Image: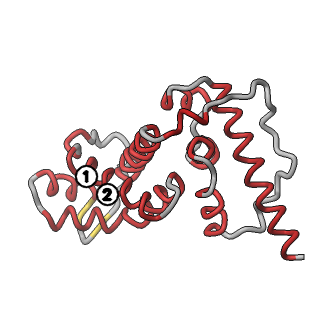
Amino acid sequence: MSPLFLNGMTEKDLIKACLKGDRQAQVVIYNCYSAKMLALCMRYARHRLEAEDIFHDAFIKVFTHLEEFSFQGSLEGWIRRIMVNTAIKYNLKKSFSSEQIGVENIPEETAFPDVFSMLSEEELIKMISTLPDGYRIVFNMYAIEGYTHKEIAEMLGIEESTSRSQLVKARRMLQDKVLKMQKVAV
């Protein structure tokens, strides 16, 4: 674990204080990670209110299960995993399963590898949020979180080929949106 200091306490001291019911320590942890984790939730959600629901549900899980944190990795990584898993479960409750129509053997390469370089992070997040749920989840998990197609398939209960095809479709939709933006700008 990193020797991170927050409000004069180490991360480990803050966790121990939280486990003893210290509300001030909880506030410090919440304030330290809330902006980053809300941004993560925004990538999985269709709009801000949905992201906030996911975010709040996940932070409740963080504090409810804090005694399960084993101090083996960073607290931030542990919280991130809870946020991602909560977002996935939230989306699986919805109509994601109707989007699981896979196209076999679609190559993962994109036709325009640098097409996103001209966008700001905010513009890209807005574009990602407009993707259908299944595309958005797989895109986030693969392109941003770094999961493999095998891991995504296991976590979502889908085939690896479905994960691959949804990633390709998500990239194509995003590329089409960028190309349309370019045409409008010219």
Which label number is shown at residue 60? Answer: 1
Q: Nearer the viewer, residue 133 or 21?
A: 133
**Numbered circle sitting on residue 56:** 2
Q: Amino acid at mark 2?
A: His
Badge 2, how many Cα within 10 Å: few under 14, some, many 20+? some
State the image coordinates of residue 157 (x, y, percent, origin top left). Answer: 50, 26
Task: Please provide percent x and percent y for residue 183.
Answer: 88, 69
The residue sitting at 22% across, 51% down in the picture is 63
Looking at the image, residue 101 sits to the left or right of residue 112; the answer is left
Tell me the quadrant of the picture where the C terminus can be found: bottom right
Q: Residue 37 location, x and y as percent?
A: 42, 59
Residue 103 on image: x %, y %:
74, 28
Is 24 or 132 nearer to us in this picture?
132
* In this view, 164 is above or below 48: above
Q: Crowding near pointer 1: few (<14 within 10 Å), some, many (20+)?
A: few
**To which quarter of the image does residue 27 belong?**
bottom left
Q: Mark 1 and mark 2 in contact? Answer it, CB < 8 Å.
A: yes
- Look at the picture and state if 27 lies above or below 81: below
Identify the secondary structure beneath mark 1: helix
Q: Residue furthest left?
A: 20
Per the model, the C-alpha gap separating discs 1 and 2 is 6 Å
Identity of the residue drawn at 23% across and 46% down: 66
Q: Which mark is residue 167?
A: none
